Image: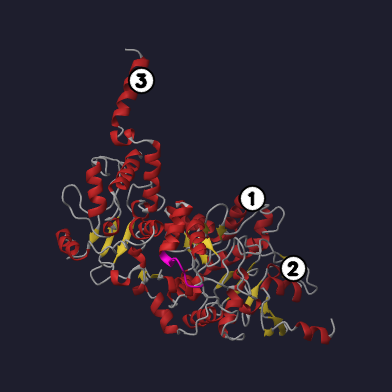
């Protein structure tokens, strides 16, 4: 597209400043109506975050927003505008494993490793959302441990809004329980 | 005695326990009774959420305390099983139990006062045909002096006969509409303001009120038209729970489920005639982008957290989220309902047929009061055609716990 053509289209834009997986992204003028999922795919080539229902129901598009106070939360990128994330730090599914200098995966995160060991996903379409949701949960429990007896209910509550069309729910559940129990400081014996 | 004889006797005994009234009532009477019970929305108070229909127990918060809907199944111990048709008619239209106990006017007997005996009998026959449910509803708990039921006699002297009078020269259809709206539907119980003693203020009939924190909007012809309503749209809204003007939410969503979705087309037409008149005012059309700044902070919030479902141009997404363009909630004189919906969200909704709307999250933890105010101002200016703005303090006031 020539400069003249792009002027003719005149899509309103605003500069977007966002940090993804620890790296500040180049500040670019981004269409103000663009959804975050499209920004990740089209501007950053981070295609691991999945477009599922496009309506915020399936949660395959979930990313993590890291708050300044050390807490984190899930946000659905298919229904949230890119500019909502202006000035924010986010993690996508690409940001969990440790990589070498060339970008090859060296070590998976605890959650990812347990998902593999439990054969949690089949088609994997929902996996990015589950990885992010489970990571948010494990990190929350590290900050705020719960009684061991509350763990199963807490996992269900944290993951129940995520949809897996291959119905891998039990294996996801068991993997997350393992991941929590093998992460020190997440549960207490008595409440 | 052989098994067969025992069975015959048991069946005969079983038949005896069925109320003679409903046994005698023919199918068309029962059908009519069911229609009237639905039109009167008895389930609104007499059915607990997820509970057995008409077995009571739904709490209704009033400024004077909590009133619980009673069991109106034909159970002889806790329901209306021991009532005669005469007694039922008396309770329904006068608000007084057979033993002389006065009902709290949470039971809309002031509205039901004009239900004709024939309709009362059909409602009675239908209710008596239901399966008795042996459940006691929780006891109503009002603060003193309202806990003293005898004081209600004075209340009744002052307010009980304040039903708007029949306008004798109006058409039969208009009269039917009035009966559906003012008597059976008891719409004024929420849509008419109340005085300090909790009685509906008939001087301000259907001019809008606030109930459980939400505005029950004015239903006068000019206000309805100003918010984009036509008689046809009103009929669609009541029948489907959803129309171009938006979807039912909060208390009205329950009214749709228990009541308005069952109403016959001719009754819906009569209701819209009664509400909007023979010659309804033209529905107001709001010009796109009325007076909102394209680069306002409110529009940024809208694009960030709303447009994903409601569309960047406010066009909505079918079966997911209603359009903002033409939405009646954005056009209310007061911002109350819009603020509450944005703050609290709306659960997933089921409407007629396969129509559904997805759950809307509340944004109390995503947007500050100042941001909610900016968003509300943008929505009301761009699609509501309203210039008046609100500030963060107004949002705080509407969403504070004391308001709940």
Q: Which mark is residue B7?
A: 3
Q: Chain of mark 3?
A: B
Which mark identifies residue A47? 2
* Residue at image location 43% in from the left, 79% down from the top: B395
Q: Position of residue A103 (x, y in %)?
A: 78, 71
- What subunit carries mark 1? A
SS type, badge 2: loop
Report x, y in % for residue B155: 19, 64
Residue hosting label 1: A167
Q: Which sits in the foreground, B57 or A82?
A: B57
Q: What residue appears at the point 45 percent right and 77 percent down from the top-left corner?
A: B335
Relative image position of residue A89 (x, y in whole percent): 63, 78
In the rendered structure, find residue B94 and report the number of the disc placed on it: none
Q: How busy is the neighbourhood of tag 2: few (under 14 within 10 Å), some, or many (20 plus)? A: some
Colour treatment of the image: secondary structure
- As displayed, is residue B41 above or below residue B221? above
Q: Is residue B125 left or right of residue A84?
A: left
Q: Secondary structure at mark 1?
A: loop
**Crowding at label 1, few (<14), some or many (≥20) Cα neighbours within 10 Å?**
few
Alpha carbon separation for disc pair 2 and 3? 71 Å
- Whether callout 3 and callout 1 share a subunit is answered no
Instruction: Pick the residue in front: B364 or A156.
Output: B364
Q: Is residue B147 left or right of residue B111?
A: left
| Magenta span of residues | B275-282
Nearest-to-viewer mark from 3 and 1: 3
Chief SS of the magenta region: loop
Q: Residue furthest right?
A: A2
Determine the residue positioned at 72% across, 84% down: A28
Q: Is residue B201 visible?
A: no
Residue A144 sits inside the magenta stretch: no
User: What chain is tagged by disc 2?
Assistant: A
Question: What residue occupies the far top of the structure in this picture?
Answer: B1
């Amino acid at each position: 597209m020539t400069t003249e053509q792009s002027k003719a289209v005149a899509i309103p834009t605003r500069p977007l400043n966002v940090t993804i997986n620890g790296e500040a992204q180049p500040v670019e003028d981004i269409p103000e109506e663009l959804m975050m999922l499209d920004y990740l795919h089209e501007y950053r080539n981070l295609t691991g975050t999945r477009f599922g229902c496009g309506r915020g129901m399936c949660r395959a598009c979930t990313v993590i927003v890291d708050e300044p106070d050390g807490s984190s939360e899930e946000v659905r990128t298919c229904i949230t505008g890119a500019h909502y994330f202006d000035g924010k730090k986010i993690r996508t599914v690409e940001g969990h494993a440790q990589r070498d200098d060339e970008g090859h995966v060296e070590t998976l995160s605890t959650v990812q490793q347990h998902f593999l060991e439990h054969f949690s996903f089949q088609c994997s379409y929902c996996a990015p959302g589950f990885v992010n949701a489970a990571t948010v949960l494990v990190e929350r429990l590290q900050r705020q441990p719960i009684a061991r007896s509350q763990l199963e209910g807490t996992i269900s509550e944290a993951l129940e809004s995520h949809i897996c069309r291959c119905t891998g729910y039990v294996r996801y559940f068991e993997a997350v329980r393992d991941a929590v129990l093998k992460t020190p400081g997440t549960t207490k014996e008595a409440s | 005695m052989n098994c067969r004889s025992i069975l015959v006797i048991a069946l005969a005994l079983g038949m005896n326990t069925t109320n003679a009234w409903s046994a005698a009532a023919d199918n068309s009477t029962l059908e009519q009774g069911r229609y009237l019970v639905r039109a009167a929305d008895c389930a609104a108070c007499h059915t607990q959420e997820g509970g057995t229909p008409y077995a009571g127990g739904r709490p209704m918060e009033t400024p004077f305390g909590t009133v619980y809907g009673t069991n109106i199944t034909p159970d002889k111990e806790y329901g209306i099983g021991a009532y005669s048709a005469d007694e039922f008619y008396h309770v329904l239209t006068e608000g007084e139990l057979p033993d002389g106990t006065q009902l709290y006017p949470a039971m809309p007997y002031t509205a039901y006062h004009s239900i004709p005996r024939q309709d009362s009998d059909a409602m009675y026959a239908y209710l008596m045909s239901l399966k008795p449910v042996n459940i006691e509803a929780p006891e109503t708990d009002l603060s003193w002096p309202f806990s003293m039921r005898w004081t209600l006699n004075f209340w009744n002297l002052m307010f009980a006969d304040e039903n708007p009078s029949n306008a004798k020269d109006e058409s039969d259809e208009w009269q039917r509409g009035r009966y559906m709206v003012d008597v059976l539907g008891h719409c004024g119980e929420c849509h008419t303001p109340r005085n300090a003693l909790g009685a509906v203020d008939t001087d301000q009939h259907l001019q809008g009120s606030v109930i459980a924190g939400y505005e029950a909007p004015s239903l006068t012809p000019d206000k309805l038209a100003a918010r984009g309503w036509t008689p046809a749209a009103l009929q669609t809204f009541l029948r489907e729970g959803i129309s171009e003007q938006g979807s039912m939410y909060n208390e009205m969503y329950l009214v749709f489920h228990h009541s308005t979705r069952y109403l016959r087309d001719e009754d819906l037409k009569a209701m819209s005639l009664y509400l909007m008149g023979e010659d309804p005012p033209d529905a107001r059309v709001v010009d796109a982008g009325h007076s909102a700044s394209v680069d306002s902070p409110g529009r940024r919030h809208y694009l960030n957290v709303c447009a994903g479902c409601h569309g960047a141009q406010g066009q909505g997404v079918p079966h997911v989220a209603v359009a903002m363009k033409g939405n009646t909630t954005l056009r209310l004189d007061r911002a109350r309902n819009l603020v509450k919906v944005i703050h609290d969200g709306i659960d997933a909704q089921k409407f007629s047929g396969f129509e559904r709307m997805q759950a809307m999250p509340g944004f109390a933890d995503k947007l500050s009061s100042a941001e909610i105010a900016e968003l509300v101002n943008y929505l009301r200016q761009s699609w509501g055609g309203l210039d008046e703005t609100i500030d963060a303090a107004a949002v705080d006031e509407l969403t504070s716990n004391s308001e709940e």
